[in-house]
Image: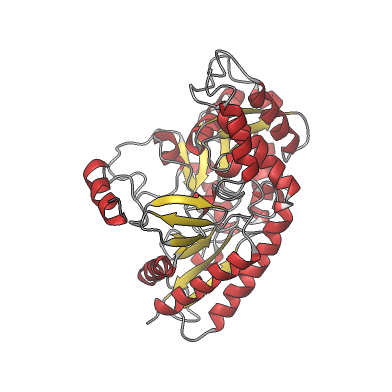
Amino acid sequence: MTSNASLQSRRVAAIPRGVATAYPVFAKRAEGSEIWDVDDKRYVDFGGGIAVLNTGHRHPKVIAAVREQLDAFTHTAFQIVPYEPYIELCEKLNALAPFKGEAKSILFSTGAEAVENAVKIARAATGRTNVIAFTGAFHGRTLMTSALTGKVAPYKKKFGPMPGGIWHVPFPVSQLGTTVADTLKAIEYLFRADVDPVNVAAFIIEPVQGEGGFHPAPTELLEALRKLCDQHGILLIADEVQTGFARTGKMFGIENSGVEPDLLTIAKSLAGGFPLSGVIGRAEIMDAAEPGGLGGTYAGSPIACAAALAVLDVIAEEKLIDRANSLGDRIKGELARFARRNDTVAMSAIRGPGAMVAFDIVKGRGSEEPDADATKRVTTAALAEGLVLLSCGVNANTIRILMPLTISDEILAEGLGKLEKALVAANA
């Protein structure tokens, strides 16, 4: 009989340890904001497949669109025999682009693939090779995106030399002691010591760092980057893979700053659980690559495009941008209440725009010293309570909350209750 224990044993035997799994529980079915494992235990989902399920598990409108597309065709390769859903989706994405002027979009399969192609497009458009990224950033696990990622272990460890032309500067996080002024000074030093700005193709930045700890990029920094880009002919790439599609209380995270990027990478919640990613950019930049230089066999799958078109409809019809803001306010209010209790693990720095909410677990109240061990105890206790909960952060002490934006008030309250119990249990 299939069970979590038997599947874990088979997993260990069949799958390399390089792909890590947070928990030894295996999904049997899911609906909305709930998951049931093969042992028939129910969980409230505060992970959302790592921000993939803003519209929830198996949203009826998304499933209906996929079934209709399945009855038509599943694959032709857009580069061979193209199809309308790809075009229609790009038209809708172009209309959503958070910058003035004409936009164009191209579709891929994964977030890393989108980032790789954004770099290719930036290099083609500028004739330059260098890219500047930030410490704590996560941009993917391919060699290029691992190079862009601002963390060695586990993303670069044992994988040999990274591609050249990639530079990192500190990402400003007040509780970690780095200011915007520090970041801008580091860029100034970089331009003086290592790379001439006339050879820099792009800056790439997450409007809110994901794996790095859910730290929003300060508006002051984004404005300064835009100014530097305009001054030196550099492109600004917003990596919206995790922040996109209503999560931050805007369609795209960078819209919270008012700063206009030149290119955006998108994925995760674009297609409601189906693999789809893309790059949206200024039309003249997007047209820089030669025909055949961009694409992919499965890029812009018709099934995923159908799902994505339905996702965009759901975001509009169910007002998920507004919902993200109301959910975030409620969650942050409850977290503040938990933090005032004297029987939970110590909590600090509740933060995040919209429903992209996080907080840190620290050694003691009033401290900023990270406590990774207590963070692990919280996520383990949450799972025992029936709550899927994720951690992240450069010090592995951040709890992030990524429940579907379609979650009901009742299930949200249930999940927050389970989180509260886990925070107490982890302090026992």
Residue found at the far bottom of this picture:
342
Q: Viewed as shown, does residue 318 lie left or right of 83?
A: right
Using the rendered image of the protein, determine whether residue 204 is visible from the camera's viewpoint: yes
Along the line of sight, the residue nearer the viewer: 28 or 113:
28
Q: Which residue is drawn at 52% across and 60% down?
A: 46
Residue 365 in percent (x, y) is at 48, 81
| Total number of numbered discs in the rendering | 0
Q: Residue at x 51, y 29 (%)?
A: 129
Residue 278 in percent (x, y) is at 58, 33
Along the line of sight, the residue nearer the viewer: 127 or 343:
343
Residue 83 in percent (x, y) is at 63, 19
Color style of the picture: secondary structure
Residue 70 in percent (x, y) is at 56, 28
Q: Which residue is drawn at 53% across and 24% down?
A: 74
Q: In which quarter of the image is residue 350?
A: bottom right
Q: 219 above or below 365? A: above
Quadrant of the image for the C terminus?
bottom left
Residue found at the far right of this picture:
101
Residue found at the far front of this picture:
1
